[in-house]
Image (cartoon, grey):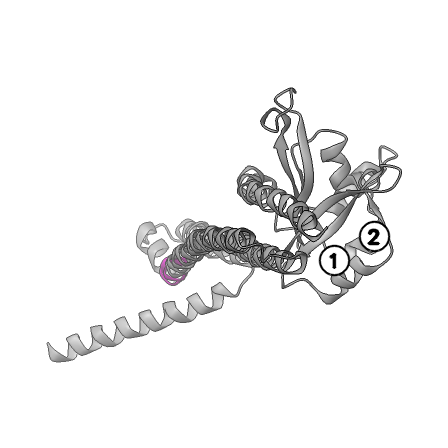
Amino acid sequence: TGFITTLVSFAERRVIRMIKNFKGLFENMSTGLLNFFTLASFLFAVPIPLLKALIKYYNDSSINLFFEWSRISSIPASIAIIILCVRVIVYRKNQQKVRKALSSGYHKTLRNYKNMKEDIANHMEKEKMNTELLTRIVNSFCKESLDDIFSIFQALTGKECSSCIKTIEKTDDEREYVETFIRSSNTKISRNKNDEINIIDYIDKNTDFDEIVNKKKDYFYCGDLIKLNDNLKKKDERYENTHPDWKEHYRAVIVIPIRIANSYNGETAEEKEYTIIGFLCIDSMSTKAFTEAQEIYYVEFAKAYAELFFSVLFDYSKNLKRINEWEK
């Protein structure tokens, strides 16, 4: 009895260790490869052993078909069960990461927003605020929020993402263009340098912004810009971008307008007419990041942050005007 107990205990430890090894292997494996192994294990566990058993039974009808199939499929079936268990474990762990990123990230943003508002209000009340300090406080909040956004989207998609806020400005002849207000801290240096290049990003020369501002779309969402561009070329059109090297920085984008309905802005207007002051942009080099199936969920989540950024930028503009009046 002692020997059997020891043997069972040893077998349990071996199985647990095997599952842990499989788990570590599969956590670093791409979804496509993981799906391949899952399908392969199923084929080797069920249909292939059954086919082998049928062939053997056809050649020798005296054998027990079920026993023969069970014998052939025992090892592949065990491997298939282990893979299935590991997939469930990995899935649950990933879901925990996503839930943690969503809850803690959004809570952190709202807490920082409350603290920023209080900090600005205290300085404004004592008339100790100046343009430099106000800009530093607002930029700090926006950068931390953008960092929360890219962390959340990386947890959601499993792919590297970055984010930025762009504001709408006007040239002397009233032509609208966008300027980068601030980027997430994980943005590559080359993209920050791109912002300093003397290129004016006119809205009507960038498909992402043009679709929203001039074609009145609620947002711009594309999981594969190169594929989109190829499809547009068939219609004698193209994906427009004022930066020719855009493919080196991103292949998939979500662009959400930072806006307010004119009916809430003291104007008499239709419900779907908006004043747009900027854009929240989230992008990735991976064409697997923003899938069509997840579009509605990713967009709604990004919109929540865009609503918050409207309040931040609108108050920033109002406070700048007050400071300018003090300094006159």
The magenta stretch spans residue 76: yes
Q: Secondary structure at mark 2?
A: loop
Instruction: Tell me the magenta residue range.
Output: 73-80
Q: Give the amino acid type for the residue marked by disc 1 in the picture.
A: His
Front-lying residue, 307 or 152 = 307
Kindly tell me whether residue 52 is visible in this rendering: no
Q: Is residue 251 left or right of residue 300?
A: right
Name the one closer to the observer, 77 or 92. Answer: 92
> What residue type is disc 2 on?
His
Would you name the residue on which mark 2 appears? 243
Where residue 75 sits: x, y (%)? 38, 63
Q: Who's the residue at 62% across and 51% down the image?
A: 288
- Reply above or below: 249 against 17: above
**Badge 1: few (under 14), some or many (20 or more) residues near its Cα, within 10 Å?**
some
Q: Secondary structure at mark 1?
A: loop
- Between marks 2 and 1, how big is the CA–CA gap? 10 Å
The tag earlier along the polypeptide, 2 or 1, is 2
The quadrant the N terminus occupies is bottom left
**Secondary structure that dominates the magenta span:** helix
Question: Which marked residue is nearer to the observer: mark 2 or mark 1?
Answer: 2
Q: Residue 173's spot in the image, x, y percent?
A: 89, 37
Q: Is residue 86 visible?
A: yes
> Label 2: few (<14), some or many (≥20) within 10 Å?
some
Please give the count of numbered marks on the rendered protein. Answer: 2
Whether pointer 2 and pointer 1 mark residues with C-beta atoms closer than 8 Å, the reply is yes
Judge whether 185 appears above or below 282 on screen. below
Which residue is at a point 40% across and 60% down the rendered structure image?
A: 86
Question: Which residue is identified by label 1?
Answer: 249
